[in-house]
Image (cartoon, rainbow, N blue to C red):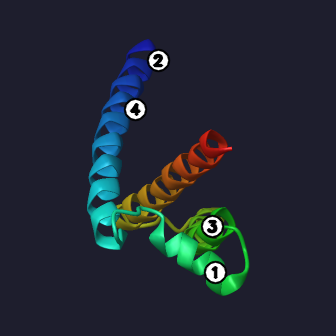
Amino acid sequence: MKRENEQKAVSFDLEVIDTLKKIQNLLVIKGREYRRNGNPYHNFEVGAKISGQIPEKVLQGFLLKHLISYQDILNDLDNEILPRVDVVEEKMNDILVYFMIQKAMLLERINNQ
């Protein structure tokens, strides 16, 4: 049992390291792709002007699609349907990216007050 737990711990640590690298890469690549005039929040701010919501809620709307997919994965697990590895990678990483952007937006708002 102890050896099994040690293996789980090593596997977990490796997954965390791998995920952090992927998230960093996604944030840089997507950041460049969506940035306008040096503004990493361009899409959320334009979305706010169009919708009348604050940029943070616009981001939440973008995130919702990924959270629904995540919920679908959990519902499938209840029915003993396993997701593909690439689907787990994509959905979880996208969710983490949106939360990282949301954190940065919130901290910027706080620092600008």
Nearest to N terminus: mark 2 or mark 4: 2
Nearest to N terminus: mark 4 or mark 3: 4
Amino acid type shown at disc 4? Phe
Residue in view at x 64 percent, y 76 percent:
48
Q: Which residue is mark 1?
A: 49
In front of the other: 8 or 38: 38
* Front position among marks 4 and 1: 1
Residue in view at x 38 percent, y 36 percent:
16
Real-space CA distance between mark 2 and mark 3, rounded to the nearest whole angstrom: 49 Å
Real-space CA distance between mark 2 and mark 1, rounded to the nearest whole angstrom: 56 Å
* Front position among marks 2 and 1: 1
In front of the other: 75 or 107: 107
In the displayed structure image, the side of residue 78 where residue 6 appears, left or right: left
Nearest to N terminus: mark 2 or mark 3: 2
Amino acid type shown at disc 3? Pro
Nearest to N terminus: mark 1 or mark 3: 1
Do the residues under discs 2 and 3 have CB atoms within 8 angstroms? no
In front of the other: 29 or 81: 29
**Where 97 sits versus 42, above or below?**
above
Where residue 29 sits in the image (x, y, percent)? 26, 61
Secondary structure state at the residue bearing disc 3: helix
Amino acid type shown at disc 1? Lys
Secondary structure state at the residue bearing disc 4: helix
Q: Which residue is mark 4?
A: 12
* Front position among marks 1 and 3: 1
In front of the other: 107 or 38: 38
Secondary structure state at the residue bearing disc 1: helix
**Disc 4: CA contacts within 10 A as few (<14), some (14-19) or many (>=20):** few
Real-space CA distance between mark 1 and mark 3, rounded to the nearest whole angstrom: 8 Å
Q: Which residue is mark 2?
A: 1
